[in-house]
């Protein structure tokens, strides 16, 4: 009895993983983490050094407004990181949704012909 329940539970769990594409989501999370590191390195080591002649010490650039210190240099680097990552996600999503749309249209065409 317990053996049947365990097998049923395992089967249900595997169906859950397939239906909600959990493995793909986990892989996307890992790849996203890795790409964040690469993009941060790109910005810090390639893009921001090009900014350095115009804004020396950009990492420590601070705008002092009375008692408030706004670290706009570090914020600018983080903003560039975000824009690059958002653009990469946009390109990937556009590609994936286009393929999904094409597959859906093919299926609808085949079903419509029958």
Image (cartoon, helix red, strand yellow):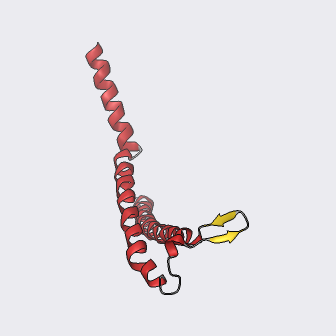
Q: Residue furthest top?
A: 1
Return the residue nearer the eye: 53 or 75.
53
Residue at the spot 42% in from the left edge and 44% down from the top edge: 20
Q: Which corner quadrant holds the C terminus?
A: bottom left
| Residue 7 locus on image (x, y percent) | 28, 24
Residue 96 sits above or below residue 9 on the image: below
Q: Which corner quadrant holds the N terminus?
A: top left
Return the residue nearer the eye: 76 or 22.
76
Residue 24 sits above or below residue 55 on the image: above
Q: Residue furthest left?
A: 3
Residue at the spot 50% in from the left edge and 81% down from the top edge: 56
| Residue 42 locus on image (x, y percent) | 38, 73
**The quarter of the displayed image where residue 107 is located:** bottom left
Q: Residue furthest right?
A: 66
Return the residue nearer the eye: 50 or 25.
50
**The quarter of the displayed image where residue 28 is located:** bottom left
| Residue 26 locus on image (x, y percent) | 36, 49
Return the residue nearer the eye: 43 or 30.
43
Residue 70 appears left or right of 32: right
């Amino acid at each position: 009895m317990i053996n049947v329940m365990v097998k049923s539970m395992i089967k249900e769990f595997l169906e859950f993983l397939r239906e909600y594409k959990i493995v793909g989501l986990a892989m996307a999370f890992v790849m996203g983490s890795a790409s964040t590191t690469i993009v941060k390195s790109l910005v810090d080591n390639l893009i921001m050094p090009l900014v350095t002649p115009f804004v020396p010490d950009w990492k420590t650039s601070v705008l002092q407004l009375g008692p408030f210190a706004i670290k706009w240099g570090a914020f600018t680097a983080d903003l560039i990181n975000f824009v690059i990552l958002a653009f990469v996600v946009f390109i990937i999503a556009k590609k994936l949704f286009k393929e999904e749309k094409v597959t859906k249209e093919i299926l609808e065409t085949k079903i419509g012909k029958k």
